[in-house]
Amino acid sequence: MKKEQTLQNLKRLLPAALLAGLLGGGLFVFLGSYADMWCWHGIICLNHSIFDISSTLQVFVLCILALFFTGMLAVALQRGEVGSQAQAAFAGGVSGFMAFFVIRVYTRVSNLLWYVGNGGTDPVGYLIDSISYILVNFASTLFAALIMAALAVLGALILFSSLEKAATPEENARASRLVLGSTVLIILVCMIIPPLVARLMIGAGMIRVHSSAALMGTFISLEHTAPDTIVLTAHKVPPAFTLADTHFSVYIDGLDGIDVSNASAAAASGLAVAVEPADGLQAFEGSQATWKGPVFEDNSTPTSVTVIAHGTDGSEIELMVLNRSVLASLN
């Protein structure tokens, strides 16, 4: 009879624990990928030796906190029906395994979509290979799942220990909100403060900025809008403080060729080239400039166009110039 009662109690805990795992897995994915990308966007390339380590440690801490939160949520969603530490541990463990399952599914689906989007012709075979990889590495997969479940169990026990002290349902709910809210606050602080401090330190000159590394992530698309007209568009431009010049330099036939960066340079070159706007291609994402002249006619020997960015460290980086049709195929 006691065994049946125990099984019924555990079965009652399952729905909320699975829901907590689903939500916690989503939070884990968000913090480990998108939040990290947003927080460090634009500065991680400025000093890889410092910011790579900082962002990695940040993700590590955030993912642990996300698993703690998952276990806490598994207990909180039970609305006071968790009667013992064993039940709390069970709910936390189930939520941890569910979170692991969500993460694995997300990873495999993302990889499959990437494969198909990049011209893959056998998605079924790719999916079978992915599943085979998981089965071959089952021991390491199980170990990772157990680690995540253990962290979720720890979070569940932390919340349960706080709820044990509550004498009434109102106190129980208040304690639950307090612990969950505090955990969310800690997650937000850990997510926002490190990149914010990094940006402030960069602005104060306390961290050396390698602008040449930042500039290498920039590329320019080139599009022929008419037989004698080209349009250059800037993509993924680094922060303005890494640039010594707010405009890119544009040359015909290589860096040692003819400077047509702006209307003045084009006029001085002696070529019949019109530049719009007159100051050329500005160094911000999405900026465009047009060059028009017979020299740009797209015949059997098209003119090569070179775009140069000037870094604050004195570097001059030749940017990648992609034809619009090539850019479209890459996207």
Image (cartoon, grey):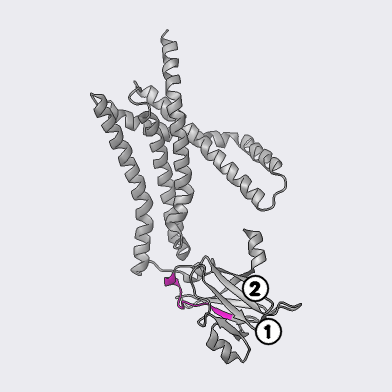
Residue 199 vertical placement versus 168 (above, below):
below
Specify the segment rendered in magenta.
Answer: 240-250
Q: Look at the image and tell me in which quarter the N terminus lies.
A: top left
How far apart, in angstroms, are the residues tagged by discs 2 and 1? Answer: 13 Å
Residue 5 position by quadrant: top left
Residue topped by disc 1 = 294
Residue 246 vertical placement versus 32 (above, below):
below
Residue 91 position by quadrant: top left
Residue drawn 50% across the image and 75% down it:
282
* 74 in magenta: no
Residue topped by disc 2 = 225
Q: Is residue 180 left or right of residue 309?
A: left
User: What secondary structure is found at the residue carrying circle 2?
Assistant: strand
Dot 2, how many residues are within 10 Å of its Cα: few (below 14), some (14-19), or many (20+)?
A: few
Dot 1, how many residues are within 10 Å of its Cα: few (below 14), some (14-19), or many (20+)?
A: few
User: What secondary structure is found at the residue carrying circle 1?
Assistant: helix
Query: Mark 1 or mark 2, which is nearer the start of the sequence?
Result: 2
Residue drawn 28% across the image and 30% down it:
173
Q: Is residue 22 or residue 201 the one in the foreground?
A: 22
Find residue 27 and report its horizontal and vertical position in percent. 44, 42
- For badge 1, the amino acid type reads Pro
Find residue 244 and report its horizontal and vertical position in percent. 45, 77
Q: Is residue 20 visible?
A: yes
Q: Is residue 331 or residue 86 the one in the foreground?
A: 331
Q: Is residue 35 left or right of residue 117?
A: left
Residue 242 position by quadrant: bottom left
Q: Is residue 236 or residue 189 the one in the foreground?
A: 236
Residue 83 vertical placement versus 204 (above, below):
above
- For badge 2, the amino acid type reads Thr
